[in-house]
Image (cartoon, rainbow, N blue to C red):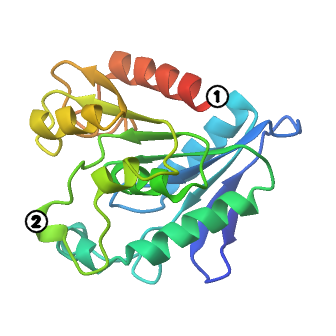
Amino acid sequence: MHSTLTSGTPMALAHPANGRRPTRGLVVIPDIGGLRPLFHDLVQRLADDNDWAVAAVEPWPGREHLPLQDRLEQVATIDDGTFLAELVEAADFLGVEPVGITGFCMGGMFTLKAAGTGRFHRAVAFYGMIRVPAHWRGPANIEPLDAVTAPDACPTLAVIGTADTWTPPEDVAMLEAAGVEVARYDGAEHGFVHDPSRPAHRPDDAADAWRRATAFLSG
């Protein structure tokens, strides 16, 4: 179902269709394309399969119609503090504890940042950028590596494809050295899990990654 945060930021919200009380919560951060039917379907599937309350938050409120190229050029304009506060509000909105967080691509990068807020029980970042790319850096940025080493950072799993140019091996090594658990998928490219329409999608690896992610989030 569609909902909004107090700021008016759109949110997709799902509870188990069987009517069972959710056992925990999950906040989902979409990829750079933002909220769309793919994520409305995903939050409902995660809710139904796991008996969770799930919310996905729009990262581009008021700019939902931006073309992809403009989004790629404007990531630096997202205020990290404001967006992280909205993710925390979404977690509170779910009304259940504990609450985990997950995200994909750009959303995976923000998942790493959110891991340092102290609000979330566990975090799973799917191919999130480990260092903010140079053309995405702005005055309101938080570096993912700083967040995952913050005093209140939660346990974090990073799902990584070894052929993903957005997560080079040296960055992955730094993430692992910072205490993040890393699940590597040999030969997988960026975006290989969450969107079956992508050429990079790998069904078997995606199924395995989901198994690992849901087990980690349930810990």
Figure quadrant of residue 6: bottom right
Identified at 61% across, 63% down, the residue is: 88
Q: State the quadrant of the N terminus.
A: bottom right
Identified at 61% across, 83% down, the residue is: 7
With respect to residue 143, does 23 lie above or below? above
At label 1, the amino acid type is Ser
Distance from the alpha carbon under mark 2 to that under mark 1? 35 Å
On the image, the x and y values in percent for residue 158 come to: 36, 34
Figure quadrant of residue 140: bottom left
Residues tagged 2 and 1 counted as in contact (Cβ below 8 A): no
Residue closest to the eye, 165 or 200:
165
Provide the secondary structure element on which disc 1 rests.
loop
Compared across the picture, whether 35 is left or right of 7 comes to: left
Question: Is residue 56 at least partly visible in the picture?
Answer: yes
At label 2, the amino acid type is Ala
On the image, the x and y values in percent for residue 58 come to: 49, 67
Identified at 50% across, 36% down, the residue is: 155
Q: Residues within 10 Å of mark 2 (few under 14, many from 20)?
A: few
Q: Which mark sits nearer the N-terminus, 2 or 1?
A: 2
Q: Residues within 10 Å of mark 1 (few under 14, many from 20)?
A: some
With respect to residue 214, does 47 lie above or below? below
With respect to residue 186, does 180 lie above or below? below
Residue closest to the eye, 38 or 180:
180
On the image, the x and y values in percent for residue 30 come to: 44, 55
Question: Is residue 106 at least partly visible in the picture?
Answer: no
Q: Which residue is mark 1?
A: 218
Provide the secondary structure element on which disc 2 rests.
helix
Label number found at residue 134: 2
Q: How many marks?
A: 2
With respect to residue 172, does 106 lie above or below? below
Residue closest to the eye, 137 or 52:
137
Compared across the picture, whether 19 is left or right of 71 comes to: right
